[in-house]
Amino acid sequence: MSNPDALIEAYRRKHPRSAEIHVRARELFPAQGATHFSRIHNPFRPYIVRAAGARKWDVDGNEYVDYVLGHGSLVLGHSHPAVVEAIQRQAALGLHYGDNHELEVEWAERIRGLMPAAERIEFCASGQEANQMGIRVARAHSGRRKLLKFLHNYHGWADELAPKGSPGALDDQVTVIPANDPALVERHLASGEFAVVLVEGGGGRVSGRVPTKVEFFQALPDLCRRHGTLLLLDEVVTGFREAPGGWQSVVGMTPDLSTIGKAASGGLAAGALLGRADVMSVLSGAAPADRRVVHGGTWNAVPISCAAGIAACSLYPGGAPQRAARAAADRFRRDANAMFRRIGANARCYGRSIVHLYLGPIDQDPADDTEAPAAVDRLMDPAKTPLHQRLDLHLLVRGVASMRGEAFCFSAAHDEAAVSSTVAALEESIAAMVAEGTLPF
Ligand SMILES: Cc1ncc(COP(=O)(O)O)c(C=O)c1O
């Protein structure tokens, strides 16, 4: 086995300025110098100075094909000219009026044009905030307290959204069950105590890694209706990424409430709760006092996010960006899987516009390679995290920024050159891990 630390040394040599900045960051940010749990890395992730299309560049002048894409938000690619132009124009007209403006109305109209279930829309500042608002609205509307969630679905880090049992979380009203079992959902809802069922749209960063069945999504609206429980579909990642109408249009279901963020605002900080007019009416001052939800938020519908959102949402009807992102993802998945077969690597890619990588002994000739290759516990095996982190570092030194060596998020800007250089970098990385003895299968 060659010296496994050689990679860390090579990485440090390639990133001298990032290393200096990281020393300063460690003195400031308690999460090992990172500002988001997914940006923590040993020794550190590169410090980025610029991004355009499918690529980004760090302070040391290294170029990356980027698959993090603003945590999945940039289905149009980095700095799409129409979005940048809208932001620049609006910045000159005012950053924040603290008042009503027409942009918020136009953005909401465009969102409703894409997602007809959005009879009413309430803007906020992030995806998690939208989910929190959805839970509050569902409780106020139903007069019930309990929340049903599914294992391995991600909705944010706050009190009831964090994994159940997380230190500091307030989750005594939260029940978490495995997805894909309508009878189990029914048994819980039959108690009549659940205000809301919260489920992540399929094909996302986590919901794509551990896929939820289409038939399960299709069963949920009726199950919820029969038991007086509201259904909240979290489309924070899938809204406007999987299709212009979101995951709900892909599987053909109508939730009572949906949440969006990320792609809705072209990559600026924003979120929104969308849903049935009668349910959303608890946000009105005219609602009875014991049902009324008061919603503040300095950053709700801030003009600059609205301008970016209008620009992005005006490119979505017809679905050309979504189809381009999916085509690039499909090409990558097919080429990477062919490469794994050719070199005899125990690995397989699967998924939709976010491609997931499974490392481990696997059938490499499945009938449908978009499907997940293994049972849930193997897909989520925490023992594999160090392997993926090692791969992530190998990919970074070869000019590929993946999502923690586990996933690759595609945009309309990922062209053939980007895809083929990524497959080549993946092949070299796997070969290097075999050579250094860090890939045990
Ligand atoms: C499915 C899903 N829901 C909600 C969130 C939280 O969104 P935000 O980070 O904008 O608060 C995320 C974040 O990645 C997500 O993946």
Image: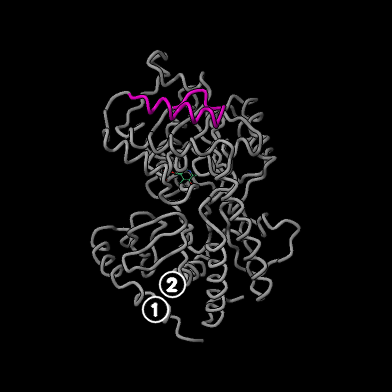
Q: Is mark 2 within 8 Å of ligand 1?
A: no
Residue tagged 1: 10
Circle 1: residue type:
Ala
Image quarter where the C terminus lies is bottom right
Q: Nearer the viewer, residue 209 or 132?
A: 209
Residue 269 in percent (x, y) is at 37, 41
409 relative to 89 in the view: left or right:
right
Q: Residues within 10 Å of mark 2 (few under 14, many from 20)?
A: many
* Dot placed on the residue nearer the N-terminal end, 1 or 2: 1
Residue 284 lies, with reference to residue 324, above or below; the image says above
Circle 2: residue type:
Val
Residue at x 34%, y 40% (from the top left corner)? 87
Residue tagged 2: 397
Asked if residue 118 lies in the magenta stretch, the reply is yes
Residue 378 in percent (x, y) is at 62, 61
Residue 181 in percent (x, y) is at 67, 42
Q: Nearer the viewer, residue 75 or 4?
A: 75
* Quarter of the image where ligand 1 sits: top left
User: What secondary structure characterizes most of the magenta part?
Assistant: helix
Asked if residue 389 lies in the magenta stretch, the reply is no
SS under mark 2 = helix
194 relative to 128 in the view: left or right:
right
Question: Magenta residues?
Answer: 101-121
Which colour assignment does the render follow? Answer: one colour
Q: How many discs appear?
A: 2
Q: Are marks 1 and 2 in contact (CB under 8 Å)?
A: yes
Residue 318 lies, with reference to residue 38, above or below; the image says above
Residue 87 lies, with reference to residue 343, above or below; the image says above
SS under mark 1 = helix
Residue at x 30%, y 70% (from the top left corner)? 19
Residue at x 59%, y 24% (from the top left corner)? 228
